[in-house]
Image (spheres, rainbow, N blue to C red):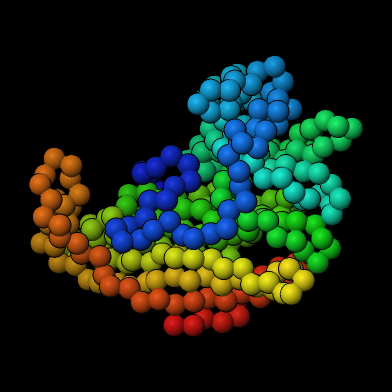
Amino acid sequence: MRALLIFACVGLCWAQPRGARKPVFPVDTQDPKLAGGAELLEAVCPGHVDVGKEIQCKTECPEFTGFAGGGPRWNAAGVIRGHFLSPSSDDVVLAMEGCESHGANFGGTILLTRRSQKWRMLWYKAGVPTQQCHKIKRSDRREILICIGSYGGQGNVWTALYMEDLLSPYATLMAGDAGILFEVFDNILTCGSMSDDPSKPTPLTRHYIERVEFRTRPDGSIRGLSVLAREGERSMTSEQVQVCIAEQLPTRPHRGIDFSPPTKPYRVDFTFDGYSFKRYTLVK
């Protein structure tokens, strides 16, 4: 697990550098208020669901969470319905925020399945982020998730594309690196000030995902995916670091100076054998 001292945003974030946009990604995760989130959460904390700005359990953090008996609110952040246990099962992934630490991505995921006309909670896993995911079918017709998420601290930002099989889910992003297919790192917001020697600033790395495209066969099955990204790097002087930092201070007038390095596009392709992805080419 990657250790960071300060976290700049709560939970998953899109703290992208100037000039970078949120990656284009086909998200299947739905807003809980539009996807029956209150009914689903009732199967987790019966009689204690509060529907306001958020759909949340209005109780202390459950005993199976990291902040058992206390902690911040525990609310639904996303819903994905699919066939995650078998080709015929009726299942739901419920992304949760709260009741967990920074190291567990400030939340986790609940898996529910529908039996005898009722939703039943099967498990809760901390550190499993499912707020931005896309469903795909395996060769056996059971569905898995391909997800994307960003996290960071002290001006450093990582963005990762990762796979989640709900029969054996991975804790990822801040909680670990299992299941990660592709990851980029960006430190533009540091201005290069993270070096132990102020006279030798850290080079600025601008690296981000622009788009994720899924390639399909004529029958609609997935044959692979492509990641379109951009990367660039530049060195910094001590004087430039100070100017860059001043440009980010809200109390100082900004002169529009941008030290972001120019970037070049590239593409990484993956094949899908019906069960897993394999990286097979890098095109620059």
Q: Residue furthest right?
A: 116
Image location of residue 91, percent across then percent down: 77, 43
Residue at the location (16% across, 52% down)? 247
- State which quadrant residue 21 falls in: bottom left
**Left or right of 191: which side holds 73?**
right
The quadrant of the rendering that contains the C terminus is: bottom left
| On screen, residue 245 above or below 284 | above
Does the image show residue 50?
Answer: yes
- State which quadrant residue 69 falls in: top right
| On screen, residue 158 above or below 65 | below
- State which quadrant residue 121 falls in: top right
Image location of residue 77, percent across then percent down: 56, 37
In this rendered view, identify the residue nearer to me: 101 or 55: 55
Does the image show residue 96?
Answer: no
Residue at the location (75% across, 56% down)? 143
Image location of residue 129, percent across then percent down: 58, 47
